Amino acid sequence: MFRRNVLCGAAGLGLAAVVPLRHAQAQAPAGAPSSEAYRWTNLPFGGGGFIGGISFHPRERGLLYARSDIGGIYRHDPAADRWVPLLDGLSFPDAELMSVLSLALDPADPDRVYAACGLSTGEWARKGALLVSTDRGRNWSIHNLDFRLGGLENGRGTGECLQVDPHLPNVLILGTTRDGLLRSADRGQSFKPLPFKPRQVSLVMFDPSSAAPDSGCRRLWVGSQDQPGLYVSEDGGQSFAKVPGLPDQIPQRATMARDRTLYVTFALGKPGEPVNPGNALNGSVWRRDRNGQWSDITPVKPGTPPFGYSAIDVDPRLPGRVVVSTIERWWAGEGKVGEEMYLSLDSGQSWQPLADRSRHNDAPYPWLVHQRKLSGRMGFWIADLKIDPFDSSRLLYGTGYGLWETRNLVAAQKDESVLWEFSAKGMELTSPGEIRSPSGGVALLAALGGLAGGAAWEQVDAAPSAGLFMPRNEGTSSLDYAEAAPAIIARTCESDAGGRVSLDGGAQWRAFGGVPQTAGQPSPRGGRIAVSAGGGFMVWAPAGSAALRSEDRGKTWQTCAGWPDPRDGELVPVADRTTEGVFYVHDVTRGRILQSVDGGRQFAPAILRLPVLNRWQTTQLVCAPGTLRDLWLALPDGLVHLPGVDQPARGIKNVIEARRVALGKAAPGATYHTLYVWGIVKLGGAEVSGLFRSSDRGASFTRIDDDTHRYGNLLSISADPLEYGVIYLAARGRGIVAGRPAAGA
């Protein structure tokens, strides 16, 4: 357990293929400095992200997977009753593959798993890839595709869009976000287009009852987003026809009972808009019997509020038992039902609503108590649900913030309460922004944004309770603390409050006051914040606006003079960690650092002739405690140390690219803080990508991550100033990860 229980002064601080599942890169040759083994664990928070799909293997009891839109894939470990992350080995160039559009299991081989991955169809995004594992996700191969997939776009909750032919497992069908329908005959090594006119696919489903000798399934069901409707092929995908008699709505999910009855859910939004999540205004549920006759079995017709239908599953052990859920009814309001789930025991002829008879245990995860008040009893964005094929009493359903599970679904058949537990042990899906390990008090402060807001961890092995930032419905953009008085914390918010200040380590907060207003313009909000070393001054750079300063801990604000043009990229104020009232800002497009020595009233150039960069390029300026103006500047092509006033700048020659830097407690026997760099460093003559530590101001480095612990994209890193070797990572979609030397674990 890491615990913060001392407060130290600044002088004692150190601030801390196929392509295998790692980005192809030069590896250090023999004789190069070896990596140090680290132990990596999540700080528990619990869920916090959208679950787009749930998959039980049909032939092996307890083999269960879940996919998320930015946090990768998880496999459930039934012995430990916890979720195991499977894509933590993705490196930065492959980070967008943490967005999983669809997951497919090979029915004939429990060890084989496929995932269609990609963040966005925007031209700026990485092209998609098919990930293939033959050992249940322990190792993966990456098959790069020549098109993009929208794993974080509207429509990502439909599916599944990737399927394995249950009778011919070398055949895969992939429905794409913008590029139609594809078929692979070699287990995903290559794909060829099928003659399916719609370009946006919502679901793909083989009909196992249609298998022909040596040719796999002949009947294939496909849903479309851009030409709404359900389509069918009777010749293995060589031709398709739109199913007549069904609504021109977007098919969301499909499931087939053992008697070959097919169930399909539909949703529809505004013309041309994908749904799930987002946009659903109408929907329905339909059943096709074994004779091919379709029936409308919609539990409740959408009206006010509008909504659609998405998640659906049948119980293979109890004929006629079906469960279905709404989608986009979550906004019904505080204390109201929101999304609804319906149970049928007669193949959809009649339905029982479950929300009023459901009890959700949110006690183990304190942040859920508030979240459920906002999103209704059942949660929101119920894209998928699954009944355990080996246990009729067990059902899991996904929401926009994690998974719920019951082990007593049969109680619903007896008009008894159904108890739901939040299935989040090991599953961390928040997307933290700025994180800080302060000089005393709590162990870590985190801006979590979105649903979570932010939190302070007193112990990093327990979910925060008293440390949850209030109010909970404000996303936190940035935060900072006073080095010499760490109980003073400021954070910026995505709300009209603009930001809040705490004087007691995050237990209580008050809103910013006296913020200057410009006629016709919205109130300043978000952006970045810096708190002076003693806590008497603050500098706030709201998003897209000139910087503001406060001399009364956020009660009133005035404009900073000399601040760079806010149109020239993101400008981040940085407080000197030693001297009260001193602030810095890196002016990226002019190649200089500006300084204020009067609490932010006036900024003036202090360091010139730095590299001139484009406004979209990312840099980071970090100030070390102990010496005035001891700065480290991370650049896209290197790292610069500015060790103090009147001291010459020094380029760290072995750093090729610095994406993030942090300073932590000095190593035993060392006189300066430990330096951490996430980027590319030259080791033994080779350029190696990873996370590195240096105890000698960058003269030498040791790699401390490994090829199974990379976490894709790190939005922030922070080193512990009180414990040597401990570092925290804000991993996009994977929560906050703590690392420490394995020898001291």
Image (cartoon, grey):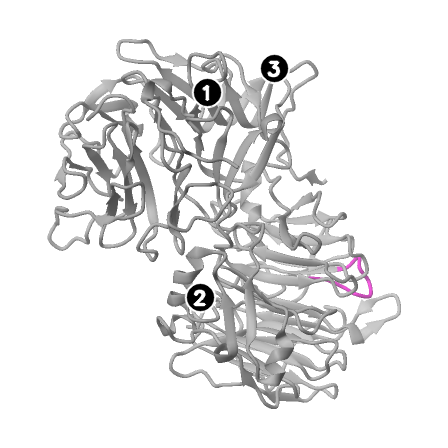
Identify the secondary structure beneath mark 1.
Answer: strand
Label 1: which residue?
Answer: 674
- Residue 217 lies left or right of residue 146; in this view the side is right
Amino acid identity at mark 3: Gly
The reply to whether the magenta stretch includes residue 164 is yes
Percent coordinates x, y for residue 670 in the rendering = 47, 12
**Towards the viewer: 510 or 85:** 510
**Residue 517 seen anywhere in this rendered image of the structure:** yes
Amino acid identity at mark 1: Thr
Q: Which of marks 1 and 3 is nearer the N terminus?
A: 1
Label 2: which residue?
Answer: 278
Q: Nearer the viewer, mark 2 or mark 1?
A: 1
Asked if 37 appears above or below 211 in the picture, the reply is above
Label 3: which residue?
Answer: 685
Q: Earlier in the sequence, mark 3 or mark 2?
A: 2
Magenta stretch, main secondary structure, is: loop
Residue drawn 14% across and 35% down? 551
Q: Give the range drawn in magenta.
A: 163-171
